[in-house]
Amino acid sequence: MDKTLEKTEIKTAPEGGEGAAGAERLIVSSSPHFLDAESIPKIMHTVVMALVPAMAASVYFFGWRALLLILVCVGACMLTEWAFQKYRKKPIKVYDGSAIITGILLALTLPPGFPIFGAILGSVFAIGIGKQLFGGIGFNIFNPALLGRAFLMATYPVLMTTWLEPRTVAKAVDAVSAATPLAMMKFEAKFAPLADLFFGNVSGSLGETSVVAILIGGLYLRYKGYINWKLPLGYLGSMAAFSAIFWFVNPAKYPSPAFHIFAGGAMLGAWFMVTDMVTSPTTALGQWIFAIVGGIIAVIIRLFGGLPEGVMYSILFMNAFVPLINKHTRPRVFGGSLKAQG
Amino acid sequence: MGHKTFARGIHPSYYKELTAAKRVEGSTLPKTVTIPLQQHAGAPCEPLVKKGDLVQEGQKIGDVKAFVSAPVHASISGKVKDVELAQHPNGTRVLSVVIEGDGAVKDWEAGSSRPDLGSLTPEAIREAIREAGIVGMGGAGFPTSVKLAPPKGKTIDAVILNGCECEPYLTADHRIMAEDPEKVVWGLKALMRASGARMGFVGIEENKPEAIRAIKEKLDNSTDIQIIVLEAKYPQGAEKMLIHAALGRKVPPGKLPLDVGVLVNNVGTAAAVYEALVYKKPLIDRIVTISGNGVKEPRNLKVRVGTSFEEVLGQCGGISGEGEIEVLNGGPMMGIAQSTLNVPVVKGTSGITVISSGSFKSKPYDPCIKCARCVEACPMALMPYKLGDYGRAHRLPEFKDWQGVSCIECGCCSYVCPAKRPLLQWIRIGKLKVRQEAVKAAAK
């Protein structure tokens, strides 16, 4: 933090020396003199609250192991944050909630059977490399949780794509490995029923099962005013619109737009990762561009890429362009294009 | 909702209920007043009196030949105790006339009669306004007579009275409209005549129904004056925002309302114009709202210019509670914090707000999380988080490129920032550095 330019607070003796009543209590600071009650911890903890339904759904569908993965990721993220802040002699702000969010989001992108050591490694990478090496909160370019997941995808590609059936699906043997709806779509051209996708009765990573749980959290955040509706709507809308083109051409080969936005990480990504304040644009036009192009890229990867899922890479890809997008989508200053009289 | 307004802005808590329904009360006659010789934008006045002189209430005690200026008058009758440098509520020290009162009070209304506006020439009205020392009473303090005389080639077709009073806590304008609508409307007509404008508007936020009703009643048959009811949103009363909401015209960056043919005046200024033309009374007192969570008995008082903050606060039960406070000349969004209570009420003092510790105390700020709240709040469509960084780092090329000089210093960005970054303070640094650079370049 900048020590030389703290908000000035000057205590002064009364000018006239008359010792005016209460004068010794006077504080001088620059306007405005009262501020909104919002704070970073308040925002972050609200996001954590909004993730509760998705976490609850993951525990419901995948059992206590899901909870264990979430706790491990959150703990590892907070510990890494603490260690870096301690090492860099920065104020310890582990409890501002941002590391908790990263931990939860990373856990929600992991397969239920993912090993604990891998989850720890991913968390250390997400916070250490993804966030603290850039300078900590506010300075990271990429979404830390997604960066952690990308790292695990590169280091443990097999473990990262070994999926379990949710326990709500009746099975003779417990914990049978299964293909995700997106993998079935890609490699077998089979489309899962929309109702199963909506409620979460499909295999996948912890948080990409239940659409309804994520929607509840997302809409709660929208209600609280902590996410900009342009981002999730732009992202999901562009995924739907772009995938609709292929669906119209060949509905047997390409899934419907509804399948695209309900399957995989689309919902989780759209409501909790595209909307990440730090790594999304600050201008209205920039937010549209970021969300819409991101949605298109996700669909392209899903349909024509080597991987069944493209949400993670589409968001990371767009993250990289945020500074550029901000720079070129500045709003026009009030009255900027008009001519004066005379 | 549904009322006219501008894009972006914020909805802070207004706390107007503390004083909104309280009638304006008279204040006790001060024993001494300290009258700064500069209470306006422009050239400071030169003193017309010296130590030991006897002065009458309303006597001119400072003036200067410069065009952009406004004379100052004695607000009480008595003896000039001194002409000295004294603390001004804008934070500087200004040559001021200190008058020791003799207890005499002048009745300005006695024997006055309202002249027929049609019989007064625009020049006569402008001259009377200048002689009465009238300046913008919303706080900026620009001499009103100067605004009424547009340079050649520019015309004014609309006069807007600013009755928005979007600053939290303040209710002075509200009370003027509710209690003296006659003066406000007549003053507006005088301003229209003096400027040659055909259209008159009174812009009022919808949270002042009493004021809207009162003004509406006085408009009777005049078709050239309209009330514009505006959404209660900060900074609705900023000149550019008001003009845009009322008329749909946008004042370009670096230009004045005059450049789009508009003259904006505070409702208090219109009332002062009435008093100047009808009572022949110069601007020697004004309505001040004394409010805030740190004052015992919030009130609206008619205060003589030059009365000390300490004396005014004393008539409101004094400062309450314990701990640190901020005493502001104006409201909490744009007011200036005082380092002493021994400062005078000036022509532009619309309120004295006392904010007690807790609600203002600056905490150490956090890094920017790019939440875009400041961008969504800025009424000028700037990007305050960028400007703040450029301003505090003195990165002037970037600061100018991102339009930092267009900032109107409303404070919305600092208000909404969840990281509590003092954005406006940093932007002010940038603006100051740009000005200094321009001065340096001009000197070369």
Image (tube, coloured by chain):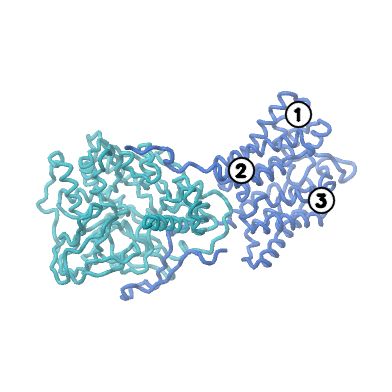
Give the mark nearer the N terminus: 3 vs 2. 3
The reply, left or right, for residue A245 in relation to residue B353 is right
Which residue type carries mark 2?
Leu
Relative to B59, residue B213 above or below: above
Q: Which chain letter goes with mark 2?
A: A
Q: Which residue is mark 2?
A: A219
Give the mark nearer the N terminus: 1 vs 2. 2
Which residue type carries mark 3?
Thr
Q: Which chain letter goes with mark 1?
A: A
Q: Residue at x 23, y 35 (%)?
A: B222
Q: Please provide percent x and percent y for residue B128.
A: 17, 49
Q: Which residue is mark 3?
A: A155
Q: CA distance from mark 1 to mark 3?
A: 30 Å
Chain depicted in blue: A
Which residue type carries mark 1?
Tyr
Q: Residue at x 35, y 64 (%)?
A: B91
Relative to B141, residue A336 above or below: above
Q: Which chain letter goes with mark 3?
A: A
Q: Image quarter for residue B77? A: bottom left
Q: CA distance from mark 3 to mark 2?
A: 35 Å
Q: Which of these two is toward me, A195 or B143?
A: B143
Label at residue A254: 1
Label 1: state its secondary structure.
loop
Chain depicted in cyan: B
Is residue A63 something one can see in this rendering?
A: yes
Q: Which of these two is toward me, A148 or A263?
A: A148
Of badges 1 and 2, nearer the viewer stands 1
Of badges 3 and 2, nearer the viewer stands 3
Labels 3 and 2 within one chain: yes
The reply, left or right, for residue B365 in relation to residue A303 is left
The reply, left or right, for residue A63 in relation to residue A282 is right
Of badges 1 and 3, nearer the viewer stands 3
